[in-house]
Structure formats: C-alpha cells, structure tokens
C-alpha cells in the first residue's frame, strides 16, 4: 500500500483548475483545436478515453456538500475511485481546495478495505499512512459514510509547458446504489441536460498563451461546477 500527495497531474503541487460546461458543438470545436497542440494522455486506451467511477463520502453534517455550496475555503472531500472497471488499483483520494488552487492526495487500498469503508467499518490505522488514518478517524468521529456514485467518460490531453491538462468529461451519470459501487453493472442516470458536457483546464502557475487562445469561444464562461454536489441534488 502507498499514499502520495499529487496535483491534478500527480505532481504534488497546488494547481489551478478551471471548469466550463460546454455543448456538443463546442466540444467538437475545442477538442479539434486541442488535438492539434497537445497530446493524448498516455494512459488512454485505444478507445480514446477512460471511464472513471467515484464513490463520494461525507460526514453526518454533510460538511463537504455545504462547504462547496457556501464557497468555504479551505475545504476538502473524500472519494474512492477506480478506472475502466478495473479494481486494481482502487484508490482512496482527498481533493483539497485552498485559495483557489487544487491539490489531491491518494492512497491505494485493497478491495477488502474498500468494502469495509462502504459498510462503515473503519479501515484501521497504519504507520505512515496519513490519509488512510485520517479517513478512519473521520469514520469514527464524524460518521463518514458513502453518499453517491459518480461515473463519466474522460478524454484527456496533456502538455509539458505549464504542466497543462485539458479534460473533456462526457456522459456524466450517477447512482445512489452506493453499496453496489464495486459491481460492474449498476443502474445509472444521466445528470446533465442532453448535449452538455464538462471541460476542465488544469495548469500550474500560467496557462500557455497558445492554449488560452485555442480555448477562446463565444458564449463560454467559467463555472463553479461540482459533480458531487450536482449528483446529490439530483438524487435529493
């Protein structure tokens, strides 16, 4: 087992993360532009994207939900995540926002630990595993429990200059069947209007000018989008 701090790119830095809700047409135009100046993330398979499934946790006061809704800074939220139906690895992650910047920390966990977390059984305490230990403490003191499943298909592009990462998230869907998180096929519902997707722009200190120009489209504005909060609202 291992734990590490990471930026959106795995660097450990606090990074900027800008979000935009875009239409089908904007997605096609933007991806065509980005494809010409950045390269596909090497982790993407031949299908051109990967599927992310996350299970979000919150405490008995729904602190992560309300802190996001109220714009609290700093704030953090916890989730378990895996990719493309592959349960090795499964990661426990915390996403922090401090002064407008994002940092992530993740810890690889076993399937058994994941199952226990879903059931509300504390994962236990291990020397040097700060994230896992913090999550276990929150389970014991604040009744941290699973709230919602979020799944989507991501097409990622990366660039060395500025440590840029542009992602297009399509088919954003959700399920309240949290106990079935590890099952391959579970009922999902789309949570975005038809023809709407999410673009995320992540970078260290400065966004290269040629990337900025490629992203300039009319009628596109930055949004404080949260998949977690949107899915919680959708399921009531």
Image (spheres, grey):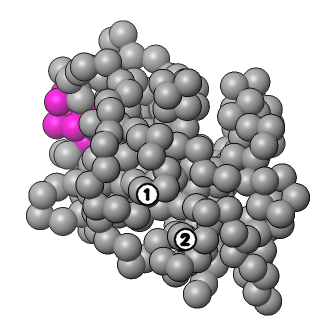
Q: Confirm whether residue 13 shows in the render.
A: no
Q: Position of residue 119 (x, y in %)?
A: 61, 63
Q: Which span is picked out in magenta?
A: 28-34
Which quarter of the rendered picture does the C terminus lie within?
top right
Q: Is residue 148 magenta?
A: no
Nearest the eye: 148 or 68: 148
Q: Give coordinates of residue 56: x percent, y percent.
A: 57, 49
Q: In the shown orientation, is residue 1 left or right of residue 198?
A: right
If you read the primary sequence from the N terminus, does the residue marked by circle 1 or circle 2 appear first? 2
Q: Spatial distance from mark 1 to mark 2, Cα to Cα?
A: 10 Å
x and y percent of residue 37 in the render? 25, 47
Closer to us: 107 or 96 = 107
Residue beneath label 1, please? 181
Q: Is residue 111 above or below residue 127?
A: above
Residue 32 drawn in magenta: yes
Q: Position of residue 155 (x, y in %)?
A: 27, 49
Residue name at image x 69 percent, y 69 percent? 121
Residue at point 74% right, 30% down?
A: 66
Q: Find numbered disc 2 in the image and state the secondary structure of the residue it sits on.
A: helix
**In which quarter of the view is residue 193 placed?**
top left
Rendered view: 10 above or below 75: below
Most frequent secondary structure within the magenta stretch: helix
Question: What mark, if any, has residue 83 been given in the picture?
Answer: none
**Residue at disc 1, secondary structure:** loop
Report which residue position mark 2 lands on.
Answer: 114
Left or right: residue 51 compared with residue 223: left
Q: Are marks 1 and 2 in contact (CB under 8 Å)?
A: yes
């Amino acid at each position: 087992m291992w734990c590490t701090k990471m930026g959106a790119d795995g660097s450990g830095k606090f990074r900027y993360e800008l979000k935009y809700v875009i239409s089908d047409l904007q997605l096609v135009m933007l991806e065509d532009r980005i494809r010409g100046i950045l390269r596909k993330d090497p982790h993407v398979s031949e299908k051109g994207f990967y599927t992310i499934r996350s299970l979000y946790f919150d405490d008995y006061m729904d602190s992560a939900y309300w802190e996001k809704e109220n714009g609290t800074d700093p704030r953090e939220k916890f989730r378990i995540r895996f990719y493309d139906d592959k349960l090795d690895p499964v990661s426990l992650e915390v996403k922090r926002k401090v002064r407008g910047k994002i940092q992530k920390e993740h810890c690889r966990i076993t399937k058994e630990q994941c199952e226990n977390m879903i059931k509300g059984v504390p994962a236990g305490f291990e020397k040097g595993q700060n994230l896992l230990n913090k999550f276990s403490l929150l389970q014991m003191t604040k009744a941290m429990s699973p709230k919602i499943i979020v799944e989507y298909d991501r097409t990622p592009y990366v660039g060395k200059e500025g440590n840029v990462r542009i992602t297009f998230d399509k088919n954003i869907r959700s399920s309240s069947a949290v106990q079935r998180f590890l099952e391959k096929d579970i009922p999902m519902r789309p949570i975005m209007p038809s023809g709407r997707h999410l673009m995320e722009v992540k970078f260290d200190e400065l966004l290269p000018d040629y990337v900025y120009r490629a992203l300039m489209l009319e009628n596109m504005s930055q949004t404080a989008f949260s998949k977690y909060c949107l899915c919680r609202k959708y399921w009531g």
